[in-house]
Amino acid sequence: MTVREITSCLAQWAPLAYAEDFDNVGLLVGDLNQKIERAMVTHDAIEAVIDEAIEKKCNLIICFHPIIFQGLKRITTNTYVERAVAKAIKNDISIYALHTALDVQLHGVNKGLADVLQLSNRKVLVPSKGSLLKLNTYVPHAHLETLQEALFDAGAGALGNYDECSFSSEGTGSFMPLEGSNAFVGEKDKRHVEPETQLQVVLPKHCKNKVISALNLVHPYETVAYELTVLENTRTDLGMGCIGQLSKPIAEQDFLRKLKGILGTPILRHSGFLEKDIERVALLGGSGSFAIDEVRRQKADVFITADLKYHDFFKGENNILLIDAGHYESEQFTKKIIMEFLSKNFPNFAFISSKTDTNPVHYF
């Protein structure tokens, strides 16, 4: 097994194209062609995890948080980041990070807590923008079906719960082959008129390169005319956070007690009680203060997230119960989700769940 084989599968599950611009995901350390004997799954690839990987003979670490987040100008032993990276390099250990590429998946970071809370009717809380593209091209009538099939096979035409979606209209194209051209039809230096079909398909952003490659490979013209447009439409299965329904309403204090038990935390920070039952629950593992207005708009009763500042607690406007569950605590199910995916897709390969507690926050 190679790093490439494992990470390619991960990239199909959580495409790196959807990671936030500020993020640093994918292969951070190592070589895609490296042969892998064992792989370790962890939340953070800190030095203690590298030591654990060395001890357990794992030469690939798959982590949620990227150990390299900002640019490194040197690799010494002065910081926890540099020490971890240096030790990984010295021991031929590759590191692959998922972070926001998995954050935006409905089956990703928030799935574990949503499962334990048994939320139904789940949907993305803050849909990602710019995740859908539209391809517009022109093809001779006789080649329409062949081109459609190639584009669909490359991932185009998927929209919600539908596949192979397209629109076509008949028209006439004109062009003049010039010296040096190898025209499919027409004569050099003469304007040619060809009955063509205008073909339009939508495609998810991460399929762009594959779809354009298929277009150029299958289209009969030497030079293919096409336009690619970013759509305002959003996908219902892609974005930050999750919102869903409890099976039955529960009092605020009882909900907090239940959540503490689920997360195994001694403390939950929260806004003032509203003296109303909780039924509609919004989740956003990690730092989620940016989504408070959207939570209010969608009329959730409670919002579970982390890293809320003092003034963030006012933003609930006495309409929602805000809960700061802790950054690590709210994301703690992520490692299990990654393990389950890898074990299902590589049943005969050794994946090890790290035993190192990487939570840097302690409570007294």
Image (cartoon, rainbow, N blue to C red):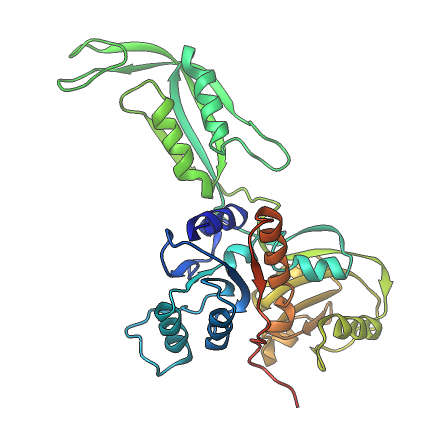
Where's residue 305, x and y in %? 64, 69
Q: Nearer the viewer, residue 363 or 323?
A: 363
Q: Please tell me how many numbered marks the rendered image carries.
A: 0
For residue 254, what is the image quadrant?
bottom right
Asked whether the viewer can see residue 296, the reply is: no
Closer to us: 40 or 264: 40
Q: In this view, does 343 lie above or below 70?
A: above
Residue 187 picture location, percent across and down: 20, 8
- Vertical side of 174 occupied by 312: above or below: below
Above or below, comparing residue 233 to residue 361 in the picture: above
- Residue at 71 percent of width and 59 percent of height: 114
Q: Is residue 95 left or right of residue 364?
A: left
Left or right of residue 123: residue 222: left
Image coordinates for residue 112, horizontal then vertical, percent: 68, 60
Taking the spot 42% from the left edge, 33% from the top edge, the residue there is: 211
* Residue 353 visible in the current orientation: yes
**Is residue 244 toward the left or the right of residue 142 in the image?**
right
Residue 246: x and y in percent read 80, 58
> In which image quadrant can residue 215 be found?
top left
Asked which quadrant contains residue 222, the reply is: top left
